[in-house]
Image (cartoon, grey):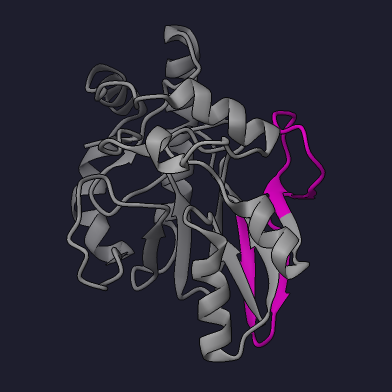
Amino acid sequence: MAAVIDPSVSPDVYLELTRRHGWSIRYVLETHVHADHLSRAREVAKQTDATLMLPTQGRVRFPFRAIVDSERIALGGATLTAIHTPGHTNEGMSYVLNEAAVFTGDTLFTNGVGRPDLHADPDASRQRARALFRSLTRLRALHPHTVVLAAHASEPIAFDGRAIAARLGDVETWLSGWLATEAAFVERVTSNLPPTPPNFARIVDLNEAGELPASDPIDLEAGANRCAVR
């Protein structure tokens, strides 16, 4: 039994992994509505007859099972526990696996945090930044040995087969400085924003509709990731 979180590549990749290991996909989960890549969650769920789960929100226009803060999902001998971590988006959710790992979506990267300004005016961006401060403070309370597994990296990576991950205790070495005060954090993440991701408005619209473009999705997704503040 398996779960897929934030599927961002062809469903064939996940299906091949399940065949190779003898798994069956029971759940497909999203941490939030993505702006940097096209979600393959609906297609993976359709091809595997899995339950599609998204954080409670009113953005998407397709059926899903809503997941709420503190909800637990049994997965064989493992348990995923949902933690509401808004800031990058209002619906952001992280998933803690057996207190050993946490899937943080775009809330926390191994060397940066999620930007709070996409689809938001300056006042809303600062409000989201304050929510992000509280979310990161909540994640910091997990055990230092918890492995942080973000939705993607905050910078280009080598295709070496190694997972992008870090222990929370190691992340804490820089995160503690960021979270010294809420006011300083809000100023830092709202004044140090990278360029807006290319095509993000079109990507968001497709993800809210649960659709993929007729053309090659990579054409929309091309370019460096820009959902992180470092």
Q: Quadrant of residue 51?
A: bottom right
Residue, x 44% and y 17% (percent of image)? 125
Residue, x 42% and y 26% (percent of image)? 116
Q: Residue 118 vs residue 85: left or right? A: left
Residue 154 vs 97, above or below: the answer is above
Point out residue 66 in the picture as x, y percentages from the top left corner: 77, 48
Identify the image quadrant of the N terminus: bottom right
Q: Quadrant of residue 18?
A: bottom right
Q: Quadrant of residue 101?
A: bottom left
Residue 189 vs 10, above or below: the answer is above
Does residue 63 show up magenta in the picture? yes
Instruction: Give the residues drawn in magenta, as a range.
Output: 53-82
Front residue of 161/119: it is 161
Residue, x 22% and y 22% (percent of image)? 192
Residue 158 vs 134, above or below: the answer is below
Point out residue 131 in the picture as x, y percentages from the top left corner: 50, 31
Residue, x 27% and y 54% (percent of image)? 110
Front residue of 126/26: it is 26
Point out residue 24 in the picture as x, y percentages from the top left corner: 67, 81
Point out residue 32 in the picture as x, y percentages from the top left corner: 57, 42
Q: Residue furthest bottom?
A: 22
Does residue 110 show up magenta in the picture? no
